[in-house]
Image (cartoon, rainbow, N blue to C red):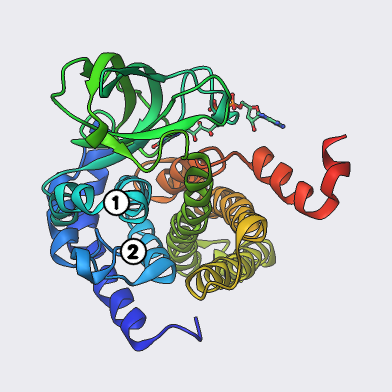
Amino acid sequence: MWFFSEEQKMLQESVRAFAKSELLPKIEKLDEEEGFNRESFKKMGELGLLGITVPEEFGGTAMGAVAATIAMEEMGAIDASTTLSYLAHTILCVNQISNNGSTEQKNKYLPKLMSGEHIGGMGMSEPGAGSDALGMTTKAEKKGSGYTLTGTKTWITNGPIGDVFYVYAKTGSDKRNLSTFMVERGMEGFSTGKKFKKMGMRASPTGELVFEGCELSEAHRVGPENGSVKAMMKNLDIERITISGISLGCARGAIECATQYAKERKQFGKPIGAFQQIQERLTEASAWYEACRALTYNSAKMWDEGLMVGREASMMAAKAKLQSAQMATQVALDAIQILGGYGYTREFPVERFMRDAKLMEIGAGTNEILRVIIARHMLGEVADL
Ligand SMILES: Cc1cc2nc3c(=O)[nH]c(=O)nc-3n(C[C@H](O)[C@H](O)[C@H](O)COP(=O)(O)OP(=O)(O)OC[C@H]3O[C@@H](n4cnc5c(N)ncnc54)[C@H](O)[C@@H]3O)c2cc1C
């Protein structure tokens, strides 16, 4: 992008090199076996990627949303699922502790999370509360000076392998009575339930967090009691902007693969890239990718500059994610078509890009929910009649 600073360009180069050397050699096997590239997190820590939004006074690199989106795109172009785990760790857990935690909580949790020694995650969704996140039923009941946490979170990225979780729970009868708690692996009454088998994002472990009378002290609560709704919603905005980087990465990876193939594969005596129908798919894909790239990085830049707040930020983030996610799925499908039979096999990465890209139309707010957010912004009360 024309506005990337020298620092952001250097980041782009170093993450691109990191993705090639550390992610590319492992992703095929991890995708096949549904594993997790834990070693890569230690290296991300050394590169300063795990505290990318954390102020320097707490040991982060404070590079912001544009930088985080660059990291997502560069890693996503090689291995979208490790990148999804990176997003959950860095944006859903680390960024939230950094924004809302006390000094003691930041000093306690951030160093190990930013070095990659600990893996983080965030628990919002539940079996009965996905799109309707405020309909959650996990509750933290007052007990003496602390709380007892009961309930189940589901589809939690890094759930099966994570060490520290940023968990939302009800602390009152109103649906906006939400509080946040830090929960650590090994605590009594906390277990990580089943791990899901998935169609894509297979090197990003997804599972349940189960709380059965898990005892927490006041020190585990992040921010004021019943005061978490705003922070939760605000973080969904930066999540939607930065996760769009993963969509951009999947699309770019698919376009690069299909373009190369179209130059090399010959049918009827010439490269298939000479056929106008193949050119149409490639050119439309490339143009849509560029449009989404401009929208996504513009939103990230506006976020960093503080140029959008409240509902406007939610609307821009929703637009960026809605378009990027749909674009990535369609572009990956087109790449499969361009590769013909090979596209449908695991000889080439395009089928993996398609399986991974589809998640971005569901996680962090489905396409339908994003359209609801945009419609409310455009139509006001009329949208909810
Ligand atoms: C791989 C993966 C990783 C995830 N990681 C995390 C994580 O780390 N932390 C976390 O908390 N959650 C996580 N999630 C959960 C994710 O955010 C939810 O799956 C998502 O919000 C959708 O919720 P749901 O699956 O319950 O679908 P539902 O809400 O049940 O929706 C089902 C369908 O109904 C549609 N729908 C629902 N409401 C409306 C409406 N008002 N108007 C129109 N259509 C509607 C939806 O768009 C969808 O098509 C993850 C999910 C996946 C698959």
The residue labelled by disc 1 is 94
Q: Position of residue 322 (x, y in %)?
A: 63, 51
Q: Position of residue 62 (x, y in %)?
A: 31, 70
Residue type for callout 1: Val
Report if the beta carbon of the residue with label 2 is closer than 8 angstroms to ligand 1: no
Compare residues 40 and 111 and report the one nearer the observer. Answer: 111
Q: Position of residue 369 (x, y in %)?
A: 66, 39
Q: Position of residue 141 (x, y in %)?
A: 37, 17
Give the residue at x 34% y 54%: 95
- Compared with 106, 171 (above or below) is above
Residue type for callout 2: Thr
Give the residue at x 36% y 55%: 99
Give the residue at x 49% y 45%: 354
Q: Which mark is residue 43?
A: none
For label 2, the crowd category at 10 Å Cα-Cα, with few meaning under 14, some 14 to 19 and many 20 or more, is many
Ligand 1 is located in which of the four quadrants? top right
Tell me if 107 is positioned left or right of 262 in this view. Answer: left
- Alpha carbon of mark 2 to alpha carbon of mark 1: how far? 8 Å
Q: Secondary structure at mark 1?
A: helix
Q: Is residue 261 visible?
A: yes
The answer to which of marks 2 and 1 sits earlier in the sequence is 2
- Compared with 127, 182 (above or below) is below
CB-based contact (under 8 Å), mark 2 and mark 1: yes
The residue labelled by disc 2 is 53
Compare residues 321 and 104 and report the one nearer the observer. Answer: 104
